[in-house]
């Protein structure tokens, strides 16, 4: 694809919209007063859910940046910093919702997920670049 092609522009817009909807759904999901897993439940999947949600978001945001033309380690560092700040904001504002609380362990799970999402995107983009004939 050329850098200014209409197809690339539409892919960027569509992917950015998917990332935005995903991000808004994550925010809503973490702030709605839903029943939560009991604290200290050894069978809780809470941290895994945090990591998975942020991995998906990191992958999408990395893809948007890549299509936008950012193609270096700076993209991945930026995504990690943005999601670290968002994760702190998300945890801090959960204290304002009923049945929710801020937890540093949740933020740590968010960061692990973000790193996994970024690494997955980096590996996928490197593989797809080498797989082209």
Image (tube, helix red, strand yellow):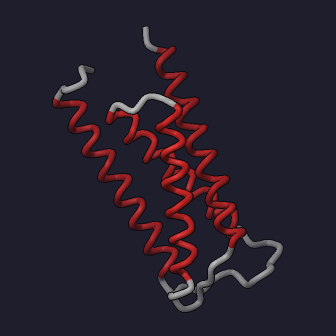
- Which is more toward the observer, 75 or 127? 75
Q: Is residue 111 left or right of residue 25?
A: right
Q: Which of the image's four quarters has the N terminus?
A: top left
Q: Which quadrant of the view contains residue 4? A: top left
Q: Is residue 19 left or right of residue 44?
A: left
Name the spot of residue 11 as percent of width and height, x first. Answer: 27, 37
Q: Is residue 60 left or right of residue 91?
A: left
Residue sticking out furthest to the right = 42
Up/down of 131 relative to 95, above or below: above
Name the spot of residue 100 as percent of width and height, x first. Answer: 59, 85
Residue sticking out furthest to the bottom = 98
Q: Which quadrant of the view contains residue 22? A: bottom left
- Which is more toward the observer, 96 or 130? 96
Please report the residue visible at 58 percent of the width from the left and 29 percent of the height from the top. 123
Please report the residue visible at 53 percent of the width from the left and 32 percent of the height from the top. 73
Please report the residue visible at 47 percent of the width from the left and 38 percent of the height from the top. 75
Name the spot of residue 87 as percent of width and height, x first. Answer: 55, 64
């Amino acid at each position: 694809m050329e850098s200014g092609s209409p197809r690339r522009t539409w892919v960027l817009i569509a992917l950015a919209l998917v990332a935005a909807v995903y991000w808004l759904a994550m925010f809503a999901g973490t702030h709605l007063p839903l029943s939560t897993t009991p604290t200290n439940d050894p069978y809780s999947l809470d941290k895994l859910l945090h990591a998975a949600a942020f991995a998906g978001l990191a992958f999408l945001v990395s893809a948007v940046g890549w299509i936008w033309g950012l193609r270096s380690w700076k993209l991945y560092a930026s995504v990690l910093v943005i999601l670290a700040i968002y994760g702190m904001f998300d945890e801090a504002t959960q204290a304002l919702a009923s049945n929710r609380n801020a937890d540093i362990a949740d933020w740590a799970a968010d960061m692990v997920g973000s790193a996994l999402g970024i690494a997955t995107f980096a590996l996928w983009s490197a593989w797809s670049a080498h797989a082209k004939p």
